[in-house]
Amino acid sequence: MSLIELKGLTKSFAGKAVLKGMDLAIEKGEVMFIIGTSGVGKSVAIKHLIGLLAIDQGEIWFDGKRVDTLPERELPPLRKRIGMVFQSSTLFDSMTLEENVALPLRKHGKLRHHAALEQARALLARVYMADYAARYPAELSDGMRKRAAIARTLALAPEVVLFDEPTTGLDPVSARRIDRLIRELAGTGVTCVVVSHDLPAIFGIADRVALLYQGITHVVATPAELRASPDPIVQQFITGQSSGPMETPGF
């Protein structure tokens, strides 16, 4: 069994179907990109993994255990094993970076204040932010805040990290720094699931890519296979052409 398995996921909002039977298997230690046009359900799919959304139908399996049926009281242990870096960095503006990163160490790791700060500084060094530990989020660029958010997510040593549009809004240099961090993280054995439409990232660091189309997984392929695919849906996404099968309403 794969580390993560999504089986027949369906999800609707206000009567509009977003996921219509999505299937996907993610292997331990890989960098899996989930791609597709805006509104296709990429972020919706990964939020189900940690119980931020409840599926309408289907099954979600993690490490051999079905998790979509877990009651709320059993979700905290799952969320320690699966961390998430949101599109907005969600840092607390009133705290320095080291205090932001130390927060989960104090709350969930039960570390004392000074020990948590020491470990937080080590985590910030891991994402090349040690020199900014005493700064506040408002003093830093979007890319720097994103790296700090990654450090905070790593605080509880998750086995899987979900990235929701990690390079959106970043300049090319900052975006590639985030790519490098994700690849380095995978090199330590952490499974990385990345929602994105950033082509340099997709073709630069992904092990496999899942393209969502009309609410289902249209194709799963390596970056090289994706480039070589004759599928018009794949090619339209890669080339960014305005005309093609993705002109279907809602995509």
Image: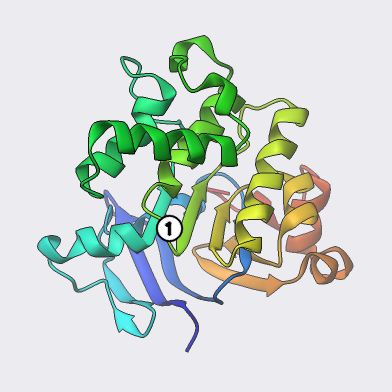
- Using a 10 Å C-alpha cutoff, classify the residue at mark 1 as few (fewer than 14 neighbours), some (14 to 19) or many (20 or more): many
How many numbered callouts?
A: 1
Pointer 1: what residue? 46
Q: Is residue 17 left or right of residue 30?
A: left
Residue 91 appears in view: no
Residue 239 appears in view: yes
Q: Position of residue 105 (x, y in %)?
A: 30, 43
Q: Tell me which corner region of the image, top left, top right, bottom left or bottom right, holds residue 7.
A: bottom left
Of the pair 62 and 137, the residue shown nearer to us:
137
Q: Position of residue 195 (x, y in %)?
A: 56, 51
Q: Tell me which corner region of the image, top left, top right, bottom left or bottom right, holds residue 86.
A: top left
Q: Residue furthest top?
A: 139
Q: Residue at x 76, y 70 (%)?
A: 222
Q: Residue at x 30, y 31 (%)?
A: 114
Colour scheme used in the picture?
A: rainbow
Q: Residue at x 27, y 73 (%)?
A: 67
Disc 1, SS: helix
**Can you say whether 62 is above or below 129 in the image?**
below
**Can you say whether 131 is above or below 221 in the image?**
above
Of the pair 141 and 151, the residue shown nearer to us:
151
Of the pair 158 and 37, the residue shown nearer to us:
158
Q: Position of residue 126 (x, y in %)?
A: 58, 42
Q: Is residue 201 left or right of residue 249?
A: right
**Can you say whether 187 is above or below 69 in the image?**
above
Q: Is residue 55 left or right of residue 19?
A: left
Q: Is residue 6 left or right of residue 196?
A: left
Q: Residue furthest right?
A: 228
Q: Amino acid at mark 1?
A: Ile
Q: Position of residue 97 (x, y in %)?
A: 43, 24
